[in-house]
Amino acid sequence: MHPVIRTVLQRLGLGLLTLFAVSVIIFSTLEMLPGGFAEAILGQGATPETVAAFNKSLGLDRPPLTRYVEWITGAVQGDFGKSFAGAGGWRSENVRTVSGIIGPRLYNTFFLAGLTAIIAVPIALGLGLLTALYRNTWFDRVANATTLTTIASPEFFVAYILVFFLAVKLRWFPPLSTVSATTPFAEHFYKALLPALTLTLVIVAHMMRMTRASIISLLASPYIEMARLKGLSRSQVILRHALPNAWAPIATVIAFNLAYLVVGVVVVEVVFTYPGIGQLMVDSVGSRDMPVAQACALIFAATYILLNLLADIIAIITNPRLLHPK
Amino acid sequence: MTEFEYKLELAKQAVTKGKLSRRDFTKFALAGGLTLTVADGLFMKAARAQAKQGGHFRAGLGHGNTTDTFDPATYAHGLNFGWGRSLVGATLTRTDQKNNVVPYLAESFEPSDGAKKWVFKLRKGVTFHNGKTLTSDDVVGTINYHMGPDSKSAGKAYLGGVASVKADGPDTVVFELKGADADFPYAFAQYQFPILAITDGKPDVTGNGAGPYILDGFEPGVKVHFKRNPNAFAPGNFDEVTQLVILDAAARTNAYLSGEVDYIDKVDLKTIDMLKSAPDTAIYDVSGMQHYTAPMLTDTAPFDKPEVRQALKWAINRQELVDKVLFGYGKPGNDSPLAPSMKFATSPEPVHTYDPEKAKSILAKAGLSGLKVDISAADAAFAGSVDAALLMAEHAKAAGIEINVVREPNDGYWDNVWIKKPWCHCYWGGRPTADTMLTVSLSEGAAWNDTRWKNARFNELLPQARGETDDAKRAALYAEMQQLVHDDGGQMVLMFANYVGAMTTKLGHGDFNSDNDFDGGYMYDRWWFV
């Protein structure tokens, strides 16, 4: 079997095991949280009777193990169950399936993550290459200082600054990114631009500096010296000889940042009221809507596993020594 | 009155009726020698007095959750106030600006048998959004839905006194109560009680109601859209209403400043002065019944000693809390949970102001000098709770009391801290009547008696006052009860917080309700665009 396929299969198997372990951790952690859905939804209004009635109708009076097995069997078959919200009502119209709730939000999240990646990754790679090429010049220093400043500022602060100047003062963008399933693509794109710019400012430094560092560390190797002695120009040395060998660490960092874009942008979502999955997860944990919280956590775990797998595959493909082991 | 003044008055009336345009009015006023600013001001004032139909009202609200549904049994937050009271739902009664109860879906309500029996007559020809006609069966079914043994409704607490509810013909509903209750109709003005359509014995909780707006799009935790119900018996003024969920206060402010929404609630008080200077902006500032308290468990040491409770009540500078935590948008409390604007509210003497010497001497007399207590605080209790607790600790130092502030997590505050820790922070949204407020928070056995206060005299007076129909006698009973709470109770009422929002001056409105935020939840059908 080809080593790449073998690795992929191995990793996928391990990923499934990890997901299973994660599911146990998620379930038991959420189980350990104080209070339940009934208390959360009724707030101050929770009396022992109303809480008991709520729990009974949600099936929460059964032992945790039964509920876990039920949930995980469903999840394996792609059925994440029904949200607690509305399940307390008398009519089935109000009951929402978890996939029905998560679906549109997941799309929004991927949309925003994709848009950000399209903007941020080329900028980061370009800047990384340029700063490596012109290292220790004023350009290098300015680029580094700027990106480090934006990554060091909290996301919400960057967001407020952008909103203040670009939305409130100049009115180029809307301050709210409220989109829905019926929003046309162009409008969705326009409304998601400001949050995407915010996130770009937040993630560029990490990827740029990794690109710069891994290229610079390669520049000291003998084969680069050889290339230079051959009379190649500096940009050719970097693009043709250094970059191919630098892909592995860069891919890892990009994967890491993409995963962050999917799972960690709740603050930006709140500031722009963008209906993504982060806000959904926080809401559902706050209101103890377990089926939704569990499904979100599983999706997050799967995202990390898949993106890391992808980074590893890129590392293998770009490294002949790993691609053709003796 | 000169001829010009007389004509100006006529012109203003014409504007109010919508018969004179802004341009024509201004022309006339300028010809009479008024300046442009004055003329325009007069026009706006006259135009605003007249409710007009039309427009799309967009409210940016700091409430809402992805778990929201249109089941009134789960109504609990600021979006729901509107849903139940003036959007999709219509209640039997309403509260007016002076906090009187007035008929709405019910045409009339009459007590008999010394307020032990209440007869509600329904308005005829009212239809639900799906076309079904409202009958007494819908009312009975709705009440039973909230009252039944399986009920998960927070509204159940209002119905504890109901012995039976029966339909008497299609337009009449008869309630038999366990004990006399002169304030009974107030319960049915609450946002949990919009009348639901009953089909096959089950209530319709999908957002179908008899209210002035029809649900037209619902994305839980994001936005809700409504359109005017043309068949409503009392239609709203706006063509469309959108509630946008914007939980972040700065995002809410930005949305307002850039004109994305016409109104925002829960304005960040730290930056309100800057918001005030925005063009065409009015601050919505209503002193309501919402109050922030610090309940002490009266059966737990050291708060089981009345002297400790009294000393602490004198040891807190409430005015400073109002100034620093509410930025002046509130009033200091005097340990009665009844807001000053409520019927039967008194201000028991002596008014609890900041007097550390007095607190010290009370403790010294009881041999309790060097008192050390813990207070649990979290912003879940009310915004600024932790700051307030730290201020309280500073104040109490002067009285020789050491308060240790325990910062609790917001998450699960109501389950793990409230009525569990001996002293903590809490908020009350207020209740429409003296009776419900006192019953819910202070009577023996009440689930929310968060001080576990058991005062025999108080508990004896409470049902007596509830059944009393003579207002003068009632006032005396409530005064005595408030005095008891003030002197002996464990509930420290720190302050009454105003409802503060911001709205564009393009919105017209009358006086505001004080029993809830959002003009009592009635802003959607009461307000209009000028």
Image (cartoon, coloured by chain):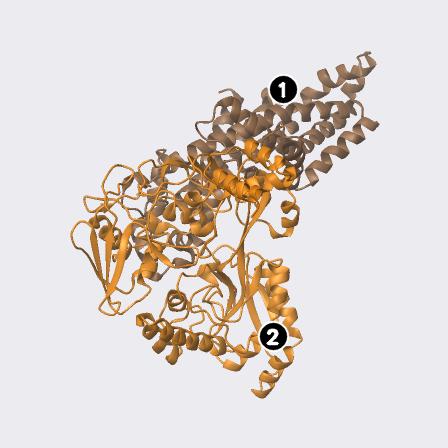
Chain colours: A brown, B orange
Picture residue at 52% right of the left edge, 64% below the top? B425
- Furthest-top residue in view? A231
Viewer-nearest residue: B207 or A63: B207
> Which x, y percent locates residue B254?
60, 39
Quadrant in the rendering for residue B119: bottom left
Circle 1: element type: helix
The residue under label 2 is: B315
Quadrant in the rendering for residue B199: top left
Q: Is residue B293 left or right of residue B202?
A: right
Viewer-nearest residue: B362 or A61: B362
- Furthest-front residue in view? B3
Q: Is residue B38 left or right of residue A135?
A: left
Tell me, yes or no, whether the two marked residues, 1 and 2, touch with CB atoms within 8 Å: no
> Which x, y percent locates residue B455?
40, 78
**B527 above or below B120?**
above
Specify whether disc 1 shares its chain with disc 2: no
Circle 2: element type: loop
Which numbered disc covers residue A320?
1
**B487 above or below B22?**
below
Which numbered disc covers residue B364?
none
Q: Amino acid at mark 1?
A: Pro
> Which x, y percent locates residue B460?
34, 78
Callout in the foreground (1, 2): 2
**B88 above or below B387?**
above
